Every structure is written in structure tokens, then in C-alpha cells.
Amino acid sequence: MVTDLRDQYQEVDPQVTERMATNLGPYIMDLLNAFASGISDEAAPHDITSLEYSLLRFCLAEGECTATQLAQVLPVDASRISRVVSRLVDMEILQRRRVRDDRRVVLLSLTETGRDLINELQRRVTAFNVRLLAGVSREEMIMCRSVADRILANYAAMKQSSR
């Protein structure tokens, strides 16, 4: 099915393709904003921002991580990561631990309160996403994922070729 659509897409009039490409950015931004707003709305009652939610999810997945790792995966600079980490430590959601062999390295991990919070937030965000995707079929989701994967692969190839 995906191959069929790609073949059909390649046969589209180049002017139509150009119009679709011109409108794609704002469309994707609207989609991203819908998901981001949902995360913000679900996290706000817990005094957590969408950036903090993303940071907590990463810490949950990794177990322990450094601020440097967070700065590499989140779309903000290191100083912003430092401020966010300090706030979450002050809220007793994250904890810091220095590595014995190298006291310069500080590992971050969730506290028990932090684990409980991120698990609750993930339930809430998942429920929001289910509501947001109401009426979208499994096939449409597969197609959407396939298109997004192709766009991301094209972007990665463009970045690689520009080096």
C-alpha cells in the first residue's frame, strides 16, 4: 500500500507537488502545536511544562542521565537545561548524584515522587492522544508514520550531504 501511494505521488504534477511542499511546514507546525498544547494542558495542573515533561520522560527511559545528554536530545541550550534541572530538583522530582570516580560528572535520576508523577502524566497524555486521534484508522496511522519516516530520512540525508 505504501509503495502504491509513493508511485502515485511521483506521478503527481510538479506544480501540485510544489504547492503541497509549500503548505507542508505550516500544516506540520499546526499538528505539532496540537500535540504540544495537549501535553502542556495535561501537565499544567502539576506545575510541569512540556519541556519538563520531555525531560522527565527521557530520565524515566534512561534511568540515569547527565545534563549534557539532556541538552543533546532536547531542543534547548545547556543553560536552560541547568535551570530546568534545578527547578525539578527543588521540587524533589529529580535528584543529583555525583560519580565517585569523577566528581565533575553529575547523574540525574527521578525520585520516587518523580516516577509517580511522570507515570501519571504519561497516562494523561496518552488519554489525550487517544482523543486527538479519534476517527483516525490504523491504516491512516501507518501511512502517516511512513510519510513522517520518509521526510525525516530525507532530512537526515540532506544534513549528511551538506557536511
Image (cartoon, grey):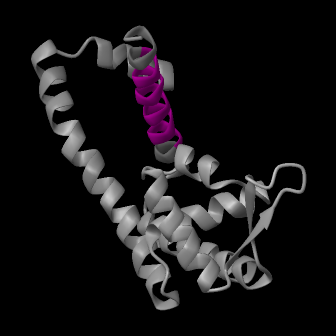
Q: Where is residue 137 drawn, in percent x and y?
A: 49, 52
Q: Residue furthest bottom?
A: 45
Left or right relative to 66: residue 82: left
Q: In this orientation, does residue 136 appear?
A: no
Q: Is residue 150 magenta?
A: yes
What is the magenta range?
A: 142-157
88 vs 135: above or below = below
> Which residue occupies 20% across, 29% down?
21
- From this viewpoint, which residue is outermost toward the right? 101
Q: Could you say which quadrant of the image residue 89 lies in?
A: bottom right
Residue 102 percent across, percent down from the top left = 82, 49
Tell me: 83 left or right of 34: right
Q: Nearer the viewer, residue 92 or 2?
A: 92
- Direction from residue 56 to residue 116 in the image, left or right: right
| Residue 22 spot, x, y in % from top left | 14, 32
The one of 26 and 93 positioned closer to us in this rendering: 93
Vertical arrangement, residue 64 with respect to residue 90, above or below: above
Q: How would you classify the magenta stretch by its main secondary structure?
A: helix
Q: Is residue 109 left or right of residue 68?
A: right
**Quadrant where the image shows the C terminus:** top left
Residue at (79% x, 60% y) in the render: 63
Residue 156 appearing in the image: yes
Image quadrant of residue 18?
Answer: top left
Residue at (54% x, 72% y) in the render:
125
Q: Decide: is 93 above or below 69.
A: below
